[in-house]
Image (cartoon, helix red, strand yellow):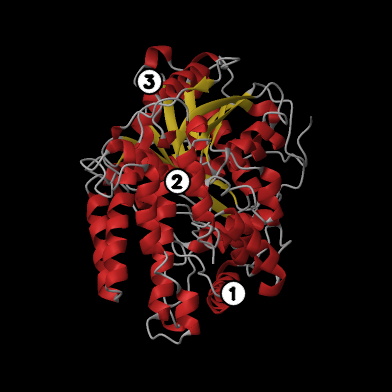
């Protein structure tokens, strides 16, 4: 299959510019006596020039066109970070990664997990990532937000989604409308970054990265340096699906992990994401019950159902609709508290092995909150969990998270199909999400509401089919119970790309990173080293999970058990 609208990514660079870039790189090096650089000190170049940075890494900034259809027009710089291969004798090139988002920083991902990735794929690979255009250290950066003074009720748009009653949805809708208007004013013109942040734009940047690498000394040592080796997580799977559809002949070792359904993604509806969110939360009570009170302080009674009933008793007391109908003065606080509780559970479901202890702390804190609902009691619980999390927090170079980044990329890919929709028109979709998940139904609507109010259209979005006869087979990777990228998406996508296979991991959490499954790491490593696919041996059994517990049997068997069935049935009644 030929890629749709394939652009030419090799273009002539005036010789004068090349000499200027090399001279500038030399000047930067001569003025920095510490020999440790940051991105503000690195000049973008069309060839890859690496500088030591952040103690253990190498950094570069790649110069690329803002618009690949106008190569002589404005430029963007793409920042890259590298964990250098530790086995140069058997060097195999680079593996490019993307952490997801959309709009997450690849620089931070490598700072946190680059060494872990290299231990899996092999010490003979460089591990490289980048901040997508408009994000983080990229230049120009999309930097627009709502001034604090313009909002009646401030809350973190990135973390807290809309709550339960329509007046809150309307308030949230107004905030995102204002965000879209500000971003359109500041970055919406064709000469600005806003219209050039589509996934297709980032795909072409990845081609530029691969082509630049192929021209380096390291690249010339590698057979098939023109092929992209890639490990994409979450939204990174959509980035990979788009790359494989546009450039199937450039696919090397290609792992898509925590898989998005691209057709659902581009519809703007995102109805195939949170299908297992409540399943994952229900498993908290199973793991807590097996772990016992020493490991899980929220433990009570004798069964998982007993622990769930403890949670339900507190959760039911947060009923903002009833409070609003009765005119209670604390109705607004009750509403925001409920959203905070749901948001924390949602986030902890991403990495249960690490975070279910936080869920236990949250459950205990919820009991204190409902007995004395004040802003101070809520803040105390939030602070307690934050302190617990700080004990295991990994390195972040800089936090660039802002809601405009997700909207700029996701809504550009949607292509305005939901733009200008009213809340009334979105109501059936909002109801479907609420029916899918008690925990995340309202929260997940940030995508659709964001795109309904985002006026900046991407100029070069991919509109072709998601499929292709790739140069090498793609390996799709999914956990059996992923809260936001269900395994059903992988089962669909392996039929769209030639000889693609699925590696299924029996585990909970978002992407293989959440499970730390040794079987999966071995198989992913073998694929990157030799191209070996799992074949019929494509299922990794359940290993130790939250609280260090090893659950006997499979999660599928546990899901069919009486306790889990009762918990999920009871949980469904919490929708109100």
Residue 496 is situated, as x and y percent measured from the top left of the image, at 73, 31
Can you tell which mark lies on residue 123? 3
* Placement of 545 over or under 89, stated as above or below: below
How crowded pointer 1 is (Cα within 10 Å; few <14, some 14-19, many 20+) is rated as some
Q: Nearer the viewer, mark 1 or mark 3?
A: 1
**Who comes first in sequence, dot 2 or dot 1?**
1
For disc 1, the marked residue is: 177
> What is the secondary structure assignment of the residue under circle 3?
loop
Mark 2 or 3 closer to N-term?
3
Quadrant of res 472: top right
Q: Is residue 310 above or below residue 374?
A: above
Where residue 225 sits: x, y (%)? Answer: 56, 23
Location of residue 370 with respect to 122 vertically, above or below: below
Residue 524 seen by the camera: yes
Q: Residue placed at 38% from the left, 20% from the top? A: 123
Residue 320: image location, x then y, percent: 46, 75
* Dot 1: element: helix
The label on residue 282 is: 2
Please name the residue shown 32% across and 56% down the image: 363
**Residue 84, disc:** none
291 or 437, which is in the foreground? 291
Which quadrant of the structure image shows residue 329? bottom left
Helix, strand or loop at label 2? It is helix
The quarter in which the N terminus is drawn is top right
Structural distance between the alpha carbons of marks 1 and 3 = 47 Å
Question: Badge 3: few (under 14), some or many (20 or more) residues near its Cα, within 10 Å?
Answer: many
């Amino acid at each position: 299959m030929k890629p749709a609208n394939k652009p030419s990514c090799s273009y002539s660079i005036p010789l004068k510019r090349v000499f200027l870039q090399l001279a500038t790189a030399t000047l930067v090096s001569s003025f920095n006596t510490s020999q440790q650089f940051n991105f503000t000190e690195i000049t973008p170049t069309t060839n890859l020039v690496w500088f030591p940075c952040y103690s253990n890494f190498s950094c570069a900034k790649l110069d690329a066109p803002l618009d690949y259809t106008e190569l002589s027009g404005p430029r963007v710089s793409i920042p890259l970070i590298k964990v250098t291969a530790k086995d140069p004798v058997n060097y195999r090139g680079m593996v490019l990664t993307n952490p997801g988002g959309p709009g997450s920083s690849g620089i931070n991902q490598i700072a946190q997990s680059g060494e872990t990735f290299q231990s899996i794929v092999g010490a003979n690979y460089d591990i490289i990532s980048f901040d997508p255009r408009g994000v983080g250290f990229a230049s120009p950066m999309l930097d627009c937000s709502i001034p604090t003074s313009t909002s009646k009720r401030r809350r973190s748009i990135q973390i807290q989604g809309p709550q339960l009653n329509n007046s809150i949805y309307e308030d949230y809708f107004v905030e995102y409308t204002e965000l879209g208007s500000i971003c359109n004013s500041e970055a919406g013109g064709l000469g600005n970054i806003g219209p050039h942040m589509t996934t297709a734009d980032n795909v072409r940047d990845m081609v530029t990265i691969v082509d630049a690498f192929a021209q380096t000394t390291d690249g010339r040592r590698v057979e098939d340096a023109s092929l992209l080796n890639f490990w994409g997580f979450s939204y990174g799977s959509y980035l990979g699906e788009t790359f494989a559809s546009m450039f199937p002949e450039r696919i090397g070792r290609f792992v898509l992990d925590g898989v998005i359904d691209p057709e659902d993604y581009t519809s703007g509806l995102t109805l195939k994401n949170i299908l297992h969110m409540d399943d994952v939360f229900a498993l908290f009570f199973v793991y807590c019950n097996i772990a016992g009170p020493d490991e899980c302080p929220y433990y009570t009674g004798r069964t998982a159902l007993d622990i769930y009933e403890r949670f339900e008793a507190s959760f039911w007391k947060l009923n903002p609709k009833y409070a609003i109908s009765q005119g209670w003065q604390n109705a607004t606080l009750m509403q925001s508290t409920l959203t905070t509780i749901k948001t924390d559970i949602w986030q902890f479901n991403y990495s249960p092995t690490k975070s279910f202890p936080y869920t236990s702390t949250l459950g205990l804190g919820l009991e204190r909150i409902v007995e004395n609902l004040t802003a101070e009691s809520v803040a105390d619980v939030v602070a307690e969990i934050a302190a617990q999390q700080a004990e295991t927090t990994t390195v972040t170079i800089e936090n660039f998270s802002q809601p405009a980044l997700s909207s700029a990329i996701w809504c550009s890919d949607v292509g305005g199909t939901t733009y200008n929709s009213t809340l009334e028109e979105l109501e059936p979709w909002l109801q479907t999400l609420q029916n899918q998940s008690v925990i995340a139904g309202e929260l997940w609507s940030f995508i659709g509401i964001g795109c309904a109010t985002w006026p900046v259209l991407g100029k070069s979005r991919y509109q072709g089919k998601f499929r292709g006869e790739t140069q090498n087979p793609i390996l799709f990777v999914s956990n059996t119970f992923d809260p936001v990228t269900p395994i059903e998406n992988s089962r669909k996508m392996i039929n769209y790309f030639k000889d693609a296979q699925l590696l299924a991991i029996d585990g909970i959490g978002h992407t293989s990173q959440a499970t730390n499954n040794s079987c999966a790491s071995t198989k992913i490593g073998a694929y990157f080293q030799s191209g070996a696919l799992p074949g019929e041996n494509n299922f990794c059994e359940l290993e130790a999970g939250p609280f260090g517990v090893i659950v006997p049997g499979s999660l599928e068997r546990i899901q069919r058990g009486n306790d889990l069935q009762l918990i999920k049935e009871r949980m469904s009644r919490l929708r109100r």
